[in-house]
Every structure is written in C-alpha cells, then in structure tokens.
Image (cartoon, grey):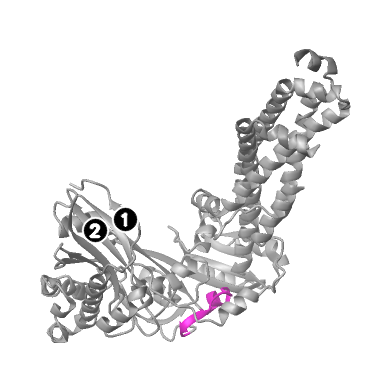
C-alpha cells in the first residue's frame, strides 16, 4: 500500500493523474508576459582550424561562461545602448599553449546585410586583438571577399579597447555594398571587447569548471 | 506481522539491495518498452493528423521512404513531372492537391546545408499550423521568402531583411517569420513554388504532391486511380503508419524477449533470496513455531516478504523509467526510423499500476516454495539448534 501511495504521489507530481488546476491555468498566466527573445548562442564551429590560424602552437582550449547580468548598468553605459538578452553571459574560450595561457577566443554572431555573420575573435594575453576569422557568412561572394580581406579584418588588429577600434568614418571608406555588414562586424567586435573588459572584474560569477573545447596537443 | 516482515528484509541490507536492483532493472526495461510503443504510436498518429492529408503522390521508388522524407522536410533524389500535379487536381475525389518542391543546398566550405521548400497556396492550406509571428502571412512577390523560426533565429532575420543564398546565388526579401511549430518547418526557408522550380528544377518537376480528399472514405478508389499516373505512385498515410508501426513492433518484440529474460532472472533472484533467507532463519522460524505461531502464519510471513521485495523493486524500476524517459526518448530518436518529434516514452499511471500489480503477484508466486518450506519447519529443530 505504501508503495502504491508513493507511486501515486510521484504520478501527481508529474501531472499524469490530471491536474486539479484549470487546464490552461499556467498557460494563461504565462501568456500575459511578453516572451524575451534572445539570439541563440553562437557555437564555435571549427576550433581546431581557428586555433591553428589565430594561435599557432596552441595545445588546447577551455571554455567558461562569465555571467554579466549583474553588470547591466556598466554594460549599458559602455555600449551606449541597452544590452541584448544574449549579452547577459559571455562564453570565453581560454587558449593554452603547453599549459600556459596564449590568449582567449570569443565568438559572436552579428546581423549582416544578407544573413548572419559569425565572427571568431582572438585576443592575446595582454588583451590585444590578435586576429579575426569569419566562420560563417551569407554575403554574396564579392562582398564576402571584402569583409574577409585584410582591409577589413586587419583594421581591428592590435586594438586593445573599444575606444581603439576604427569608427564610422572607416566604414564609409569601404565599398557601398559592404558597409552594412562591416558596420555590424565593427559593432560586434566592440561589444565583445566591452563585455570581456567588464567580465574581468572580480565580482563576475564564472562557471566553476571550464569545459574542454579541444583536446590536448593539436599539433 | 509487518514488523517481522520489515525486520526480515532489512536484516541483510546488501542482499536486499541486490535483489531489489535486479527486479528494478527488469521492470524499468519492461515499462520503458511498453511506454515507448504507446508513445510512438500516438506520436505518429498526431503527426499524421496534424498533416491534414490522406495520401501523397511520390516518384517511383520506395513509397514509404519518399513520403516520410517529404513529411520530414527532406529531399528526394527523384521527382514528379508537373503533369502528375495536374492529373491529381483533375481527380473528382481530390479536394486539394498541393505540390511541394524540397531542395537542400549544401555549402561544404561552411559545413552548412540550407533546406528550401517551394509551395503554393494549396500547400499553405494543408498546413494548419502555418502562423506568422512577424511580417506577412504569404509571399507578396516571387522574390520573397518566409522563414521557419529556427532559420530566422540563426540568421538574425526579420521581416524586410535581405536573405541571400550562396548556393542558389539568389537574394530574397524576408516577407515573414513563422511561429515555432515544433515541426521540421522550423528549419525550412519557404519560397513560392514557381520561383523554387525556376531555381532548382530544370523542367518543372516537383518533389511530391500532398493530397486531401473530399471524403476520406474514398481513399482506396482514389489511390487506385492516382496510381495510374505515369512516373508516380501513391502512398496513403494510413499504410505508411502501419508500415512504421509494424517495423517498430518487430523491434519491440525482440526487445520484449530480452526484457522477459531480465524479469525471469529477477524473479529467480527473489526466489533464491527467499529460499536462502528461510534456510538461514530456520532457528528463528522454529522458535516462532515453538511459541505458538501457526504454519500458515510462517507461510504468510515469507510470502509477504517476497511480495514486498517485488513491489519495492517495481516502484524503483518505474521511478527510473519515469525519470529517465526524456533521456530514453532522446536516445530512441537517434535510431528509430522517422521517430515522431518530442517522443518521450513515459509510462502512464495505468501502466505503472499494472506493472506494480504484476510484480506483486509474481513475488507471491515465486515465494510459494520457500514459504511452504518455512511452514513445514518443526518447532523441535529450533529447540535443538538453540
């Protein structure tokens, strides 16, 4: 009898015995709240080839999540806009070379003119931007070539803070067809630098155990 | 009596734990298999009901594979000529014949595959879940695209944005974004059928024609007529469901045999445990006899212990089957052909109660011999050994 009673309690807990609450009770309450739509987290699709290009000699990488929801005021102040829902957390991939930090990789999806553009941004241990790769893009070939060129990606090289990034006048020098997407990339990189800078303060909670992204000894 | 039962069980915790584990594992496998069969059947039926169609016209080849691929938003290697669409539309029993053109466009350099679906107004009428979250309900011009919710979220697109396909070499304007439907439509980009045919079909071919009948009772005669269309074959969704269910039923029978073996092993474990327990506790049982316990009371004591072990084991196994149902469903999705979306083989209350009852009765059955032996113990032995 005790066993049956226990089973009935479990069944009630999981709602298989019919709920005494109104059938649409929860749904009705939820429906009155606007759903917060955030963009899906951008995955790091090709870590091996990106590390080989951005951090030659890297042996592995570990990923951690830094929670920035407690820093929304700082974020809004430095970004100059309200943070997006997906900017409440930053996924930081720590790159290691023979056990020592070689830098970090940040990944971000930005809204290009013809579709999403996914950026892989590498920063060295000093926090200087050491390279950017485009892992996915939907731009037509001619525009994609401009965006992937040294003229665009090279402009970010060596920047350490968001204030050192090229400004709107730089975008205006690019061919007209590439300006919207280049501007989106610029804003994406700027946001990442701001988020990384804020995430390096001590009060930011981090995931307790970094996840291994790449196994040891890439090369 | 219950006090004695509990004392008899917890007196040897390791043996009790192992016996419970054996019963629990057997019941968990058994309940999960039963629940999987029920969930698959109802999930399949729900998907087909939601499709709102009775049959599909597909190119020659394996009709079930073709129909399943189209339902799941995948492409076919063969196609139907436009004349097949016209022939289906001319049939007097056909209320709606909706041609679909599915195309997958690969971009190996980015390991990306875009799934495109061309459809016309008739196709939309067969999609009752078609609801637009943002933008227009339908294509304002041939250069428009309506995106499934997943595609829009991944590509950061909303109504009015441009959407370029590197594989097709064409730029579209996003007319609308569909609400999340939980179907394969979430991962598709829909474009007008004519535009799709001009982009991916050289001679006005389509992938399949979904058909809704004026009267579902006319299914057999209509299928026979449509079967005459050159290059096409008909598959009714009832047949398709039957085929899948047969396939799953065969697998289930095989697995049921394994689970029966596990149950038999578990019950033999209980029998062994109870027999050993009676042998070990003979002095104690004889003492009970000596102070006035009747043979039927000792019989009942052993039988109750066995029933308690089997019942507790069944509850533990069912708890595992219930809590592990989402994980089991996730694993099953990977290897069962065309498994319905969101398959969670969670045992129902009725199934749980039935399994507990069967376990309890089985416990009683396997306890008969040890209980009989216990009831036959003479009071004198207890005196001698003590």
Q: Position of residue B46 (x, y in %)?
A: 63, 63
Identify which residue, B168 or A198, lies in the foreground.
A198
- Identify the residue at image location x=45%, y=73%: B149
* Count of numbered labels shown in the rendering: 2
Residue B61 placement (x, y as % from top left): 51, 53
Where residue B251 appears, x then y in whole percent?
59, 42
Query: Disc 2 and disc 1: Cα gap in Å?
Result: 9 Å
Q: Quadrant of the C terminus of chain B?
A: top right
Q: Which range is magenta?
A: B121-136
**Residue A43 showing in the rendered view:** no
The answer to whether mark 2 and mark 1 are in CB contact below 8 A is yes
Q: Residue furthest top?
A: B384
Q: Secondary structure at mark 2?
A: strand
What label does residue A94 carry, if any?
Answer: 2
Residue at the spot 66% in from the left edge and 73% down from the top edge: B92
Expressed as whole percent of the image width and height from the top left, the position of residue A75 reads 29, 79
């Amino acid at each position: 009898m005790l066993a049956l009673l226990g089973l009935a309690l479990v069944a009630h807990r999981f709602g298989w015995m019919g709920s005494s609450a109104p059938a649409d009770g929860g749904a009705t309450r939820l429906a009155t709240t606007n759903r917060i739509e955030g963009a899906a987290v951008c995955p790091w699709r090709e870590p091996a080839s990106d590390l080989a290009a951005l951090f030659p000699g890297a042996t592995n990488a570990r990923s951690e999540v830094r929670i920035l929801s407690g820093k929304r005021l700082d974020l809004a102040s430095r970004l100059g806009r309200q943070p997006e829902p997906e900017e409440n957390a930053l996924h930081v991939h720590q790159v290691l070379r023979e056990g020592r930090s070689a830098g970090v990789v940040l990944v971000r999806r930005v809204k290009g003119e013809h579709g999403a553009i996914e950026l892989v941004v590498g920063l060295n241990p000093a926090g200087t931007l050491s390279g950017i790769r485009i892992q996915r893009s939907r731009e037509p070939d001619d525009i994609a070539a401009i965006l992937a060129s040294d003229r665009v990606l090279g402009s970010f090289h060596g920047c350490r803070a968001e204030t050192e990034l090229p400004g709107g006048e730089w975008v205006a020098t690019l061919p007209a067809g590439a300006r919207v997407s280049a501007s989106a990339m610029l804003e994406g990189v700027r946001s990442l630098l701001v988020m990384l800078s804020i995430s390096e303060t001590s009060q930011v909670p981090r995931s307790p155990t970094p996840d291994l992204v790449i196994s040891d000894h890439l090369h | 009596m219950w006090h004695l039962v509990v004392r008899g069980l917890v007196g040897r915790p390791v043996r009790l734990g192992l016996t419970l584990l054996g019963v629990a594992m057997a019941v968990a496998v058994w309940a999960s298999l039963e629940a999987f069969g029920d969930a698959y059947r109802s999930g399949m039926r729900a998907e087909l009901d939601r499709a709102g169609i009775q049959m599909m016209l597909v190119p020659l080849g394996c009709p079930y594979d073709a129909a399943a691929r189209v339902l799941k938003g995948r492409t076919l290697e063969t196609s139907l000529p436009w004349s097949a669409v016209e022939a289906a539309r001319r049939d007097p029993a056909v209320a709606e014949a909706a041609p679909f053109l599915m195309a997958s466009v690969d971009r190996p350099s980015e390991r990306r595959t875009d799934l495109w679906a061309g459809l016309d107004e008739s196709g939309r009428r067969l999609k009752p879940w078609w609801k637009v979250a943002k933008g227009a309900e339908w294509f304002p011009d041939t250069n428009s695209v309506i995106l499934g919710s997943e595609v829009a979220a991944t590509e950061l697109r909303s109504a009015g944005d441009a959407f370029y396909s590197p594989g097709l070499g064409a730029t579209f304007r996003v007319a609308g974004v569909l609400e999340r439907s939980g179907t394969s439509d979430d991962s598709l980009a829909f474009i007008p059928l004519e535009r799709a045919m001009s982009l991916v079909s050289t001679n006005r071919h389509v992938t399949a024609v979904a058909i809704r009948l004026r009267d579902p009772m006319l299914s057999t005669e209509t299928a026979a007529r449509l079967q005459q269309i050159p290059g096409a074959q008909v598959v009714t969704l009832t047949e398709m469901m039957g085929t899948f269910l047969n396939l799953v039923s065969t697998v289930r029978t095989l697995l049921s045999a394994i689970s029966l073996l596990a149950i038999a092993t578990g019950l033999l474990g209980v029998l062994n445990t109870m027999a050993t327990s009676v042998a070990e506790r003979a002095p104690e049982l004889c003492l009970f006899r000596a102070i006035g316990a009747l043979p039927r009371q000792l019989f009942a004591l052993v039988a109750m212990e066995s029933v308690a072990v089997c019942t507790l084991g069944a509850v533990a196994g069912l708890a595992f089957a219930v809590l592990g149902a989402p994980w089991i469903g996730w694993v099953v999705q990977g290897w069962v052909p065309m498994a319905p979306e969101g398959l969670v083989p969670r045992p129902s209350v009725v199934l749980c109660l039935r399994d507990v009852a069967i376990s309890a009765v089985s416990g009683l059955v396997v306890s008969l011999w040890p209980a009989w032996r216990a009831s036959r113990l003479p009071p004198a032995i207890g005196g001698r050994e003590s």
